[in-house]
Amino acid sequence: MSAPASQASSPTRPPGASPVLSVRDLRVEYSTDSGVVKAVNGISFDLMPGEKLGLVGESGSGKSTVALALMRMIRPPGRISGGQMLLQGKDLVPLPERTMRQMRAREIAMIPQGAMNSLNPVARIEDQIIDTLEDHATERRSKKVLLDLARSALESVGLRREVGRMYPHELSGGMKQRACIAIAVAMRPKVVIADEPTSALDVVVQRQVMDTILRLQDELGVAVILIGHDMGLMAQSVDRLAVMYAGKLAEVSPIREIFAEPLHPYTDLLIDSLPKLEDRGTFRGIPGLPPSLKSLPPGCLFHPRCPKVMDICRQEIPEYLELRPQQFVACHLHEERHDRAAD
Amino acid sequence: MSLRYLGKRILLLLAVMWTAASINFLIPKLSPRDPIKERLEQAAMMGGRNQTGLQAMTDAYSQQYGLGEPLWKQYLHALLKVVQFDYGYSISQYPRTVNSVIKDALPWTLGLGITSILIAFFIGTMLGALLGWPRSPRWLRAFVPASMLTSAVPAFVLGFLLIYLFAFQLRIFPLAGAYSRTATPEWSLTFIADVAQHAILPALALILFQLGGQALQMRGLMVMTTGEDFITFADAKGLRPRRIFSRYAVRNALLPQVTGLVMSLGTFIFSTVLVETLFSYPGLGNLINSSIQVLDYNLLYGITMILVFAVCIATLVVDLIYPLLDPRIRYEGR
């Protein structure tokens, strides 16, 4: 089997543009007493400047681990055990922590998962923005300038300037999440990773927060990786969708294509499990559970749950191929077709 | 902060004082011993002959000290004394008043106690914060078992060890007392140096005992705090580790640590009593011990009430400064 890295680096980009972030064969492992857990098991994808990429998967599929890995914030007993993360051509994996710290927020930023507890409870909102500005500053700026910058950042996410004087407990959930967004984009990063930014919010506030993220994304031209498990939200928000299963990418396709014609049976089942207006009362799930990351099944990781399972799926790991331009899939169903097309 | 809250807190303080006063009054009364009779018998024995009329004398003195009254009258009397802050004469050090005996001892206890608890809190908290910080150097972890050890060994046992090592074997520090017998108490540099030299061992016993506990508690709080989402986000903001440590982690872990300090005041006083006794330190702790031995009700009563009062005031003060530490806590109004 050829190296997946070389496969995935095949031309995927529109002519003239180069990706702002290229992930190649990224691996993350956690050492536990009962063995090594392969949380991220060799994933590769490109992110174009200003692009919105969705990353979906079940709980435990490794989505959040990818987010942490991209921020280089995997803490022991976890570690990045292989692969490259090229941010504008510069590999983040071997960078010393000191340099990486300076990249965070300035080049690559994160909107946290639990906005409810992501702000320091004993510091004013504006001071928490100023902390970021100060620790990335190249020159000393007066308190007044910093305060003004911080309050402008709050305005940019639709919060009043006075919110800066407040403490986190005085804010509603939606306001807290906006404040986090303001902090994340305060340094005008190239890439923003939003890890389930709306999971703790009610639907109306979810919508407002997503609108804020997308508006900022538009204004600042940052590339966004949106992590979540809400396929409906993804359909409304992203350009391309990456589907993760048990630490691997099952499929990466543009959002229209993936809903029109999902290539991987897992994607198919995910879309099928969305509740539909015309089909009330029934609620389809995907039978079975994801495999234990400590002892992965041989062959395709999805084969124990796959309705279209073939003999080869139980033995050989499917390659991650670009089946059509911009559409990647790792599935034996398509490998044959791909081979036939290549013949 | 509202006056109403303050009023409520002061009422609560009075209730605690009343309860303590009642318990302090009743417990020594459960003892079948009679302090006056014991004292007179002792005097008689020293006189070398069997004095007649001992019982009559005992009764007379008891009457004088108010010990012959019915219990409820004594109780009301005792409460009145608390309110007036006047505990009458010391039985064992007659004719000195309880207040004057306490006045002599209090500065020594305050000096030793407050200094050691503050040092223990400060060093223990810093040490614990570093122990609970994932980026601390590995060698620091050797302090974890060391902290467990010193916090598990009672202060007076540590005191014994210190005396044996530094006062008895090495003879670096004096064995006991608050100052040399030859020195006269005055505000001179030599006297202060003498006092400091005498205070080091008892202070060390108290500090070591407290420090371990403070460090372990702070370590636990830090481990909890560094697992919080706002620490992860602070990391994602690319903040300097030093800032995350102080302004995000320690700052938040400190809140329960301060509460813990107040809660440990009671244990601390208990340790001080034993350590002062061990070092013959002329403070309140030593005085408590001796007044229990000779059953000096009045003195015992005065000291315990002073200690209860001190703990109550410390709790109240911490309660009132808590809103400064934690913006989430606010007493209605403002």
Image (cartoon, rainbow, N blue to C red):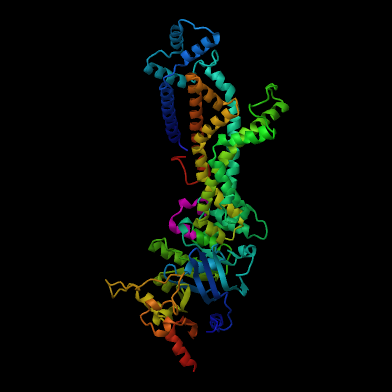
User: How many badges with numbers are in the image?
Assistant: 0
Q: Nearer the viewer, residue A120 or A187?
A: A120
Give x and y (percent) for residue B163: 63, 33
Q: Is residue A62 above or below residue B165?
A: below
Image height of B263 relative to A291, above or below:
above
Instruction: List the single residue furthest toward the front.
Output: B49
The magenta span reads: A160-178
Q: Where is residue A337 shown, x and y percent of the image?
A: 44, 89
Q: Residue A104, located in which quarter of the rendered image?
A: bottom right
Q: Does residue B176 show up magenta in the picture? A: no
Residue B256 position within the rendered picture, expressed as x and y whole percent measured from the top left: 50, 45
Is A337 placed left or right of A69 in the picture? left
Question: In the current view of this chain or complex, which residue is farthest to the top?
Answer: B52
Residue B110 seen by the camera: yes
Q: Quadrant of residue B96?
A: top right
User: In the drawing, does residue B9 fall left or right of residue B223?
Assistant: left
Residue at point 44%, 40% (across, down): B333
